[in-house]
Amino acid sequence: MTLYVDNCPDKDKLEICRCHLLIKLMEVLRETNNKEFVKNTLLVINSLYGNYPPDYYNSVGSDIADLTSEEKETLIPHFKIEFNHAGGIL
């Protein structure tokens, strides 16, 4: 499911909402001087209101449904190793 800004029926309202959020965020910064919170919130706002796909890998690669059984059997052990190195548990 794609939820990018291009799919928003009213881009003007979306931009107004984003601007209001930024103004409120600057008020929070002035009142609290919590730069870390503001920085993280800016990242979230940018990711929610930005006009770009989630990341480069979102649009490259193969769909798992297109892989053969042999390809899946070859790849899954590699994925498990990578997942465990990243701190995950399988």
Image (spheres, grey):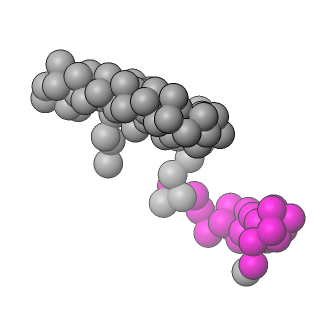
Q: Quadrant of the C terminus?
A: bottom right
**Image-based side of 8 in relation to 69, left or right:** left
Q: Is residue 20 visible?
A: yes
**Image-based side of 17 in relation to 54, left or right:** left
Residue 47 position within the rendered picture, expressed as x and y whole percent measured from the top left? 47, 35
Closer to us: 57 or 30: 30
Residue 79 position within the rendered picture, expressed as x and y whole percent measured from the top left? 75, 64
Q: Residue at x 40, y 38 (%)?
A: 48
Q: Residue at x 56, y 47 (%)?
A: 62
Region of the chain picked out in magenta, as a range: 66-89
**Image-based side of 5 in relation to 51, left or right:** left
Q: Residue at x 75, y 78 (%)?
A: 89
Which residue is at the far front? Answer: 31
On the image, which quarter does residue 40 sit in? top right
Which residue is at the far left? Answer: 9
Q: Is residue 46 visible?
A: no
